[in-house]
Image (spheres, coloured by chain):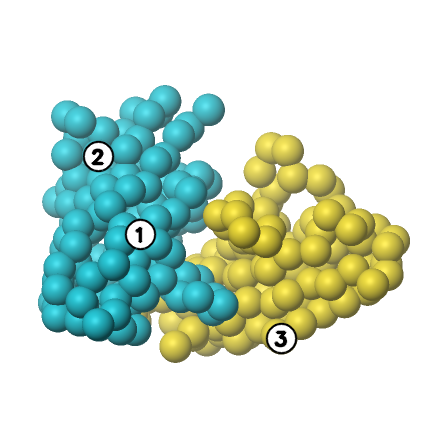
Chain colours: A yellow, B cyan
Amino acid sequence: QSVLTQPPSASGTPGQRVTISCSGSSSNIGRNTVNWYQQLPGTAPKLLIYSNNQRPSGVPDRFSGSKSGTSASLAISGLQSEDEADYYCAAWDDTLNGHVFGTGTKVTVL
Amino acid sequence: EVQLLDSGGGLVQPGGSLRLSCAASRFTFSSYAMNWVRQAPGKGLEWVSAISGGGGSTYYADSVKGRFTISRDNSKNMLYLQMSSLRVEDTAIYYCAKDVGVLGVAGHFDYWGQGTLVTVSS
């Protein structure tokens, strides 16, 4: 059972901006940084955003992250067809003493 | 480029055991914590276990605690997951993932293996 809650789906047309929310609690997002992973169909997950808003080398600046209190968000601006994927937020949980993932959001480019 | 190769998956009966392996290369293996993350068919990601770089600290999800054991052999650059008392609900693709830190706490995963499928069924 996932501890972090995300909307199951999000969609937009090419060029639009899409935002995905991630809701947690004081024991995870409230105390620790949030990371985001992108999983393209049939592939392993890939790190997209770390430490709330940092992009690894090679990740386009169309992807951005933010955090406020016990929630976080991932924004994709200038949506492209290759952005169709599942997106997961994740954080360390101090009570569970382990990592927790979000429920996942499927992004569809219309 | 960092490389992680998962192996050891297969079909096993409920109550059985299986050992997964992850061969790591092209980075200083002992300097980083490692993790196992699984994904049931058509479902989301679930963190399973973590181990610190030296192997002295281990962490488990409640769903596998007491049944799974994570270990590593730094001399061979290998990560393992010994799974016992397997249940149907353990059926999933299992990925090994490299942490960015050595402790295994509150980090993020910068590289992932390709995954190995474990099917628990009679």
Instruction: Tell me if mark 2 has few (under 14), some (14-19) or many (20+) residues whose alpha carbon lies within 10 angstroms of its own.
Output: some
What is the CA distance from the residue labelled 1 to the residue labelled 2? 13 Å
Where's residue B79, x and y in %? 22, 40
Q: Mark 3, mark 2: which one is toward the viewer?
A: 2
What is the CA distance from the residue labelled 3 to the residue labelled 2? 37 Å
Amino acid carrying label 2: it is: Met
| Element on which disc 2 rests | strand
Chain letter of the residue carrying label 3: A
Chain letter of the residue carrying label 2: B
Disc 2 marks which residue? B78
Q: Are the residues under marks 3 and 2 on the same chain? A: no
Instruction: Tell me if mark 3 has few (under 14), some (14-19) or many (20+) residues whose alpha carbon lies within 10 angstroms of its own.
Output: some
Q: Residue at x 83, y 63 (%)?
A: A110
**If the image is split into quadrants, where does the C terminus of chain B sit?**
bottom left
Disc 1 marks which residue? B36
Mark identifier at residue B22: none
Where's residue B13, x and y in %? 18, 67
Q: Are the residues under marks 3 and 1 on the same chain? A: no
Disc 3 marks which residue? A7
